[in-house]
Amino acid sequence: MTLKKRPRRIRNNPFSRSLVRENRLMIEDLIYPIFVTEGQNIKQPILSMPGIFRLSIDNLIQEAKECYELGIQAIALFPVIDKQLKSEDASEAFNDHGLIPRAIKELKKQLPNLGIISDVALDPYTSHGQDGLIDSNNKILNDETVEVLVKQALSHARAGCDVVAPSDMMDGRVAKIREALEEHKFIDIKILAYSAKYASSFYGPFREAIGSSVSLGSASKETYQMDPANGDEALHEVQLDIDEGADFVMVKPGMPYLDIVFRVKEAFSKPTFVYQVSGEYAMIKAASEKKWLDEDKIIMESLLAFKRAGADAILTYFAIQAARILQQHR
Ligand code: PBG
């Protein structure tokens, strides 16, 4: 055959494959989510997330140090709140002496340069497991919830966090949080908005990890999280959060929603984050344990796909594992 075009030509050698590679995953792209719990020297395994633990603050510091030494730039904190502290009004969410403010303070003392992202949502703190307050008919109350979220964000800001990350999907919360941060002179605190967050079944293992699945029971989050059937709506949500003052926007879950990551980045050219959620982690882990998949390779391929889709940073429970793999390949 005489062929003018042979696309395989540039794939022939490692050198030319490397020269034409369009996307690269770097350790600096990774954000590690960590579950924090009360107590000392606690490291509780999470059944559906092998390799991930609930850590007391002392162990959290060790894990955070490991992240920092590997070159991971930021961690995201998720609290496991004692059952006695959960309530209808989620008042523990803005307790300045609560678990998360204490964790933030200790982290900032020990690792001032590691970015600390704190979750703003009520589900770890409500007795019913919803991200918002409810009325007597179990309706999720938007505006009342936003008021509590503002208090929570300010409490994290006072503790010294770098980024507050509203993951609750209430309307108007970014605007109100931004306004409050400005009023209180926290002008440098960034908002990572979970803008296109879907009502997904991929969050199952996370809910086990923070203990909200029992409280939630069979209730769903469909009145505030997005319908997995929708794409245009994600763009509307992202637009609103940008207009309201978000610094970074996020799509969640990750792999099943790569089209959304792509569209958001294309439409707005804003810093776009993606969350490879607990269920995605669990799937890869489970298949790898069975030796049905090559774990390291699947991890790297799944993370690279986020970059190709347009993500600037990736929240992933594989952050430490991926950073180690990337270091070996230096
Ligand atoms: C709740 C929250 C969830 C996750 C992050 N924040 C779960 C939910 O909305 O029920 C999921 C993260 C994961 O699955 O890894 N505010």
Image: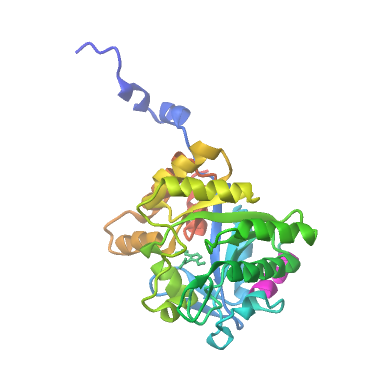
Residue 76 in sight here: yes
Residue 217 is situated, as x and y percent measured from the top left of the image, at 39, 79
Q: Can see residue 114?
A: no
Quarter residue 88 falls in = bottom right
Residue pictured at 40% horizontal, 44% vertical: 259
Q: Position of residue 225 (x, y in %)?
A: 45, 61
Q: Is residue 287 magenta?
A: no
> Picture quarter containing residue 3?
top left
| Secondary structure, magenta segment, majority class | helix
Residue beneath the point at 50% across and 71% down = 140
Q: Is residue 81 above or below residue 297?
A: below
> Measured from the top left, where is residue 5 in percent x and y?
30, 16
Q: Which residues are magenta?
A: 100-110
Q: Residue at x 52, y 61 (%)?
A: 169
Q: Is residue 262 left or right of residue 168?
A: left
Q: Foreground residue, 132 or 60? A: 132
Q: Going by the image, does 128 lie left or right of 118?
A: left
**Of residues 80 and 95, the one drawn nearer to the viewer in this rendering:** 95
